[in-house]
Amino acid sequence: MKLKVILFSIIFTFSIISANQGDIKLVRIDPPGPQLVKKRNIMINADDVMKILSDVEKSGVRLNIEFATKDDFVIARFGKIEKGEISWAHKIEKGHMKIKFGKSEYRGLLEKVRSGIGRPGYQIILSDKKSNTVINSFELTFRPFPNLSVELSYPVNVSPGEQIGEKVSIAIKNTGTAPSEEVDLDLLLSKNFQIPLKKYSIEVGTEGVRLLEHGHVKVPGVEAGGEIELKPDIKLRLPKPLEDGRYYLGAVLDPEGKIKESSVENNVFRGFLMIAQKEPSKISMSLAGSTLYYTPKTYDLIIRNAGLDISISKEWRKCQIRPYIFHLKHATWTDFFWEVNTDEKMVWKITGTKFCKKGGVAEKLNIIVLPEGGSTKVPPRRFKLVFGETKVTFEPKSKKFNLLLGGSGVAYLPFWQTCKTSPVKYHFKYATWDKYVWEVDPIKKTLRKIPIEKFCKQSDEGEELPAKMELE
């Protein structure tokens, strides 16, 4: 038994370099006939051995050339290198060396030769004659096989749903000793580094692995030693929705295992990917209707949505023109105001006149008026304005926030706080809120009411509110 140690030329006065170290080398061994088996002989193709050694620097080197298991257990000696010359330990006839093995060694080797597997687990080793240390090795295969590998060139920083086909290229190499047939290649997205080599099941759902949209690619045959470059479908697209974070872009060659190769370990490519939702320029949300409550006697005004105040009296000016006619003006409005007629149960948008004055141009608004008591001579105890839709818009870059009711903005920024809790997740808080805040998630397109102590923090708690979200 020998320990495999790689020693560099700083220790030795010579250097041995394989042109393609790490590749699997072909040394053809045909299944032996009955007479050879009886004598425990194997016919090894000497030309293949010589081809491997042709790339070895031989000057000033004294080495043994040996046939060994993958654990460096020597089972036969081919020959030696001295003074730049190779001398063989066996007679070469018609390009073959006939070698006899021990019983147990022969049994294992014969089984591997007959099985025809791509990586039988044997190697040629070159060992220093003096120290008996292995300084170079060449993994063997006994029959010609293709050996395909795949690498991707791709963008690392992407967003959910992004079409990446134009930015991806696929390099396929065949470092084997035989041409390959046409095979399939699947492009995958995985949350885990461990992308399976064998066929994953989309139907059953391999955990954390998804086939990308348009991610199926046909790979033509590649000549031995050849390389080709492919482009996937230009529509190759990442899934959406998708949570932000670290992912792996995978490419799996021949996932069905249709061809026999000397090695399948390099049939899988795994590349690091960072997925983050691109921040939208504008978020628009349509919420369930809000209600304005106004008490004329106390001038108290509150607008509520889903149990939360979204506007209060200090943002508004109020004026009573007649017992049944009221003017309301938000602090942000400069050239219009609302006129509420509790007798006719109508709301008008008034322009062209001063607040708390008659006249002007009136535009009817689609707002329901619900008075409690009152007449043309007596003001109502209270009235409600019911809005069919509440709309919220937010522009992350400028932090511009708008809350619109009845087509008119009623948000007054000093009364609202906004906070970014992740690359594209936002919290909104109104000045009077003491129990809850809003959380807006553009990725999931959800609006939630979450505990106020979670403001500006990550939270899994909360109640989803009905909202239709659009992104620009």
Image: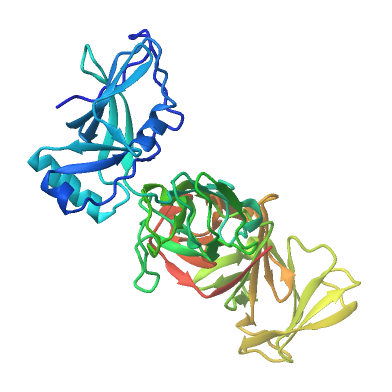
What is the tally of numbered marks visible in this picture? 0
User: In the shown orientation, is residue 173 left or right of residue 204?
Assistant: right
Q: Residue drawn 59% across and 76% down?
A: 290
Residue at 39% x, 27% y: name it: 53
**Residue toward you, 405 or 302:** 405
Judging depth in this view, the residue of 98 and 177 nearest the camera is: 98
Image x and y of residue 226, in percent: 54, 46
- Residue 468, image x and y in percent? 59, 74
Above or below residue 24? Residue 349 is: below
Vertical position of residue 208 compared to residue 85: above or below: below
Name the image quarter holding residue 123: top left
Residue 125 seen by the camera: yes
Q: Is residue 435 visible?
A: no
Q: Is residue 386 left or right of residue 319?
A: left
Quarter of the rendering occupied by the C terminus: bottom right
User: How is this picture coloured?
Assistant: rainbow
Residue 326 in the image: above or below residue 72: below
The answer to whether 137 is drawn above or below residue 310 in the figure is: above
Residue 340 position within the rendered picture, expressed as x and y whole percent measured from the top left: 74, 81
The residue nearer to you, when weighing 92 against 15, is 92
Q: Which residue lies furthest to the left in this view?
A: 103
What percent of the width, then of the height, locates residue 311?
61, 65
Please identify the residue farthest to the front as the structure is shown: 93
Q: Left or right of 318: which side holds 440?
A: left
Nearer to me, 449 or 36: 36
Quadrant, the N terminus: top left
